[in-house]
Image (tube, helix red, strand yellow):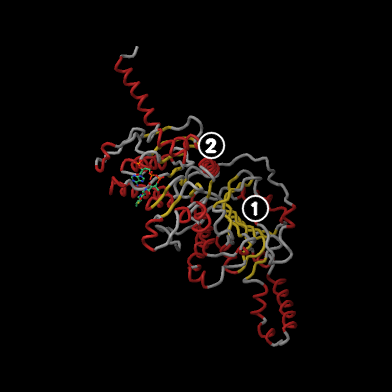
Amino acid sequence: MLSMSTRSRIEELRKLYEQALLGGGKEAIETQHAKGKLTARERIELLVDPGSFLEVDMFVRHRATEFGMDRRWVWGDAVVTGLATIGGRRAVVIAQDFTFMGGSLGEMHAAKIVKAMQFALSQGVPIVFLNDSGGARIQEGVDSLRGYGDIFYMNVMASGVVPQIAAIMGPCAGGAVYSPALMDFVVMVRKTSFMFITGPRVVRAAIGEIVDEFQLGGADVHATKSGQVDFVAGDDREAIDIIKRLLSYLPSNNMEDPPVVKTNDPPDRPVPELDEIVPDDPNAPYDMYKVMEGVLDLGTFLEVKAQWARNAITGFGRLNGRVVCIVANQPNYLAGVLDIDSSDKIAEHIRFCNAFNIPILTFVDVPGYMPGTKQEHGGIIRHGAKVLYAYSEATVPKLTVIVRKAYGGAYIAMGSKHLGADFVVAWPTAEIAVMGPEGAAEIIWRRELEAVKDPQERAKLLAKFTEEYRSKFANPYVAASRGYIDAVIQPRDTRRVLVKALEMLSTKREVRVWVPPKKHGLMPV
Ligand code: HXC
């Protein structure tokens, strides 16, 4: 028999749970729903395996007293934190609760987040941070700022140790944007979320520009223009599905390999349609997605930053159940040229994959770097160098398929043997040369061409010289004769060959790759 006082304490705790689960209260929850948003707890329920959530710090409260804060508080201080399993694997979950003071971040709110992140680090499990907050809690002043500082510090400590995924599911403004910015992937919900350093009012006051919050920092803007966002979701549910799918490709931490799954797709499946994919005209576009999708296990391609810098493709896929990091040029968009944004996109993705032991598979069809003052003045030299740096630095298995063009510096940059690729194959359609045959012919035979005055005759001569150059260099065999590529293969055999190569390279480990001792390298930024 329980004594009355014990009974009443147990009853009291039950009531406290009820209170805590309501966050900022029923009315605030209704307002949240009316905006098309789920609450922090509803989001967690959708994200984690049923019944797996182990909440911590439910009874944390703020201790500020200024500006009426002694009369205003909520259990949990507007953020729900804990550990759960997602797809059977552990993760730390942090979800800001907009229903109390707009999910604003004060001292104790931040302390909960930091504690959860420390737990993720010590356990070696990913961090999933669902953002929905009005930013620094204004009433808590510098304690709020300190809280952000502590979170940023933890983001950096966790960087490259455990995967960090942020979802923006409401406001995210001011310095608050820097936690997601320091994390590895950002998912943003269209129409209900925005992200900017300074909001529309300040923008108007400071520079007279009139813009609303979605034009300034909505999901589509970040997905297409700034490249800040990796995935866009139509609503909260879709955002959560994306997070779950993304996690399925990632190891829990940098000491583990990514999970291998069983597949029904035969490893030696021939892909005859690939024999037909490269057009006869070397300047005609074709769709690199079709190449990748033919080669990867069926339905496994998950694209990252799909809408930004579309001349490059980045993402994840599987080959015979093993996760690979995908990097590709897209001849269908700007001829697959490397420019500032695509260089950043590629370099960032490679560095993530290298940090988390994910082999890199590159599909090459690149005519070179984008010419012109816009690119030169924008720093294409510095940005392009990031690609060289990221590939060279990567110690994971590196596999490269040269599909068609691999010209000049871009040939070297795109996962060439010279930057440490372990296995480079070329299709018979590959053209590995210092530059395109036409440009090369114009330079090599300039005098001969200038001597011919009749434009038609000159064009004929140029075509002859172009062909001469093409037959000499625009093929894979010169590079193959030097061992710069390991094999020339039929397109239809690409999947079979890559599956085998990936298996052969599966014991590659960082400790067996020579890198001079250093504190850290200096990647151009
Ligand atoms: C305290 C806040 C708050 C904040 C919102 N609230 N943001 N309380 N500190 N930062 C409160 C509101 O007063 C309101 O309280 C409740 O949350 C819900 O807000 P609403 O305005 O009713 O909601 P909505 O219309 O959806 O607008 C959300 C919003 C807006 C866009 C976030 O509230 C807003 O602009 N807030 C201020 C944002 C801001 O300037 N933050 C500081 C950024 S600077 P009641 O009592 O009415 O329910 C920053 C620096 C970080 O973050 C630096 C790190 C280095």
Residue 81 percent location from the top left of the image: 40, 37
Image quarter in which the N terminus is found: top left
Q: Is residue 504 left or right of residue 352?
A: right
Characterize the local packing of mark 1: few (<14), some (14-19) or many (20 or more) Cα atoms within 10 angstroms. many
| Residue found 54% across the figure and 44% down from its top | 242
Q: Amino acid at mark 1?
A: Met
Instruction: Let me know if residue 290 appears in the view.
Output: yes
**Kind of element beneath mark 1:** helix
Return the x and y of residue 317 as percentages of the image width and height. 60, 48
Give the secondary structure at mark 2. loop
Q: Determine whether, in the image, residue 174 is placed left or right of residue 193.
A: left
Give the distance between the C-alpha atoms of the residues marked 1 and 2, in whole angstroms: 26 Å
The numbered mark, 1 or 2, whose residue comes first in the sequence reads 2
| Crowd class of label 2 (few under 14; some 14 to 19; many from 20; radius 10 Å) | some
Q: Residue at x 71, y 79 (%)?
A: 462
Q: Is residue 511 visible?
A: no
Q: Which residue is mark 1?
A: 292
- Quarter of the image that includes the C terminus: bottom left
* Front residue of this view, candidates 450 and 257: 450
Residue 68 sits in which quadrant?
A: top left
Q: Which residue is mark 2?
A: 87
The residue sitting at the left extreme is 66
Amino acid identity at mark 2 = Gly
Residue 48 in the image: above or below residue 207: above
Indicate which disc residue 251 carries: none
- Percent position of residue 233, x then y: 53, 46
Residue at 66%, 57% (x, y): give it: 287
